[in-house]
């Protein structure tokens, strides 16, 4: 008995051109809830079953982020298309196999270059590649290396294609110039948003409506999928770079610092970990935590789980009760950060004296750094930053408030 699926009902509106395009590059920037990732996942499952010699490579900046994102989305796509019985998903190695033919979906991270350069497929050809959260690929050369690996002659009717999906946090990113500013017959560049997603509930729509009123700048990016305008960045002294924490920690006059900014319903709890090389005036941000609805017990457990339970942590002094509770839960060395007149400005100026390197796994830190700008009034830039994209930035200020003091403990 054969099962017939109405694919247009599964995909919904807004993606007809995307679905049918067969050019080299298919690039979709979109706001949250715009269906870009779920549509891509369904396209891959559907077309691999349609093209029995096609294999797919799925790329994220950091390999271990696949399991809770692309891997899960592709499993969902199989279920949504009622074909899960024809697919096998394994976690070691992380891959998906179309059982009737042996075709593979392979998952890789740019943090392990050797795993990408050595890719081979047992059945057919490597035809397609999906870059999820492509905004996190800060170096265009990393993309070019994957692009060049999708090569070779294909059977008649087959085509090679790279799909990139992302939230457009900053207009300064190479993705804009490469795919959206330059017109090419080999590029489909689209912008989508939540309004093309008929599968959202009324409560989902209400979140966007509230964001539109309360945070219009964030709504333009996360709601409408427009480029984040990064004019007047507070910190323009940062870059994403993969580095070895243990190597940096061995440098003389290097200290470890940790900061915590509290949140709950509307704002996330933000925790940041960094190494400060005082001799070379460099800050290496190597870990973060960013989540809403965290109780103080949850925060303490998170800090212990990450292995920082015995570290010296500076936290927002506006919540002394929370600090006391977290200390009661075993985080003995947590202390309140100092706050005073112009403490935000002084903290920013202190950090501006350092070059900031952010490990690629610290995704939320990169997003905040790319969008934390000085506020404007009547077109004039003020000396105050906007009250957005600042949770990890505040945590970083707390963490680094003593770095210029003598005698601060080294790593």
Image: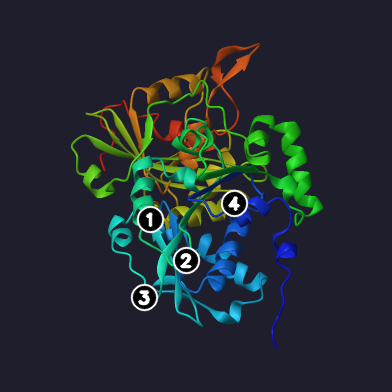
Q: Position of residue 341 (x, y in %)?
A: 53, 17
Q: Position of residue 210 (x, y in %)?
A: 76, 38
Q: Determine which residue is flagged by label 4.
A: 294
Looking at marks 3 and 1 on the same chain, the residue that comes earlier in the sequence is marked by 3
In screen coordinates, is 271 left or right of 268? left
**CA separation in Å, label 3 and label 4:** 46 Å
Task: Give neighbour class at mark 1: few <14, some 14-19, many 20+ (Cα, 10 Å).
Answer: few
Q: Residue furthest bottom?
A: 1
Which of the 4 image quadrants contains residue 390?
top right
Q: Position of residue 289 (x, y in %)?
A: 49, 48
Looking at the rendered structure, which numbered label has been put on residue 156?
Answer: 2
Q: Determine which residue is flagged by label 1.
A: 307
Looking at marks 1 and 2 on the same chain, the residue that comes earlier in the sequence is marked by 2
275 or 59: nearer the viewer: 59
Q: In front: mark 3 or mark 4?
A: 3
- Label 2 near label 1: C-beta < 8 Å? no
Quick one: quadrant of the C terminus?
Answer: top left
Looking at marks 3 and 2 on the same chain, the residue that comes earlier in the sequence is marked by 3
């Amino acid at each position: 008995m054969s099962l017939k699926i109405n694919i247009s009902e599964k995909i919904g509106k807004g993606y007809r051109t995307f679905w049918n395009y067969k050019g080299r590059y298919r690039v979709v920037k979109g706001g949250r809830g715009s269906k870009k990732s779920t549509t891509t996942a369904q396209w891959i499952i559907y077309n691999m079953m349609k093209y029995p010699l096609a294999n797919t490579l799925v790329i994220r900046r950091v390999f271990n982020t696949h399991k809770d994102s692309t891997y899960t989305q592709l499993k969902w796509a199989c279920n949504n298309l009622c074909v899960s019985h024809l697919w096998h998903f394994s976690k070691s190695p992380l891959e998906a196999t179309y059982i009737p033919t042996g075709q593979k979906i392979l998952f890789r991270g740019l943090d392990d270059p050797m795993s990408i350069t050595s890719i081979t497929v047992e059945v057919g050809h490597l035809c397609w590649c999906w870059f999820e959260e492509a905004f996190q690929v800060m170096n265009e050369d990393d993309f070019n290396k994957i692009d060049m690996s999708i090569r070779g002659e294909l059977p008649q009717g087959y085509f090679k294609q790279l799909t990139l999906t992302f939230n457009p946090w900053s207009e300064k990113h190479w993705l804009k110039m490469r795919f959206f500013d330059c017109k090419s017959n080999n590029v489909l560049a689209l912008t989508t948003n939540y309004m093309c997603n008929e599968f959202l509930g009324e409560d989902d729509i209400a979140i966007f409506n509230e964001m539109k009123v309360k945070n219009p700048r964030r709504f333009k990016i996360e709601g409408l999928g427009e480029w984040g305008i990064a004019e007047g960045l507070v910190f323009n002294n940062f870059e994403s770079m993969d580095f070895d924490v243990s190597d940096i920690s061995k440098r003389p006059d290097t200290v470890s610092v940790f900061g915590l900014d509290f949140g709950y319903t509307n704002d996330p709890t933000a925790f940041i970990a960094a190494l400060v090389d005082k001799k070379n005036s460099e800050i290496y941000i190597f870990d973060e935590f960013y989540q809403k609805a965290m109780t103080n017990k949850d925060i303490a457990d998170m800090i212990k789980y990450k292995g920082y339970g015995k570290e010296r942590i500076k936290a927002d002094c506006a919540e002394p009760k929370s600090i006391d509770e977290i200390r009661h839960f075993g985080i003995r060395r947590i202390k309140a950060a100092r706050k005073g007149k112009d403490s935000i400005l002084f903290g920013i100026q202190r950090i501006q004296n350092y070059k900031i390197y952010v490990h690629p796994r610290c995704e939320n830190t990169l997003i905040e750094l790319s969008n934390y700008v000085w506020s404007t009034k009547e077109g004039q830039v003020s000396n105050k930053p906007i009250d957005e994209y600042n949770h990890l930035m505040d945590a970083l200020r707390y963490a680094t408030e003593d770095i210029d003091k003598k005698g601060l403990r080294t790593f």
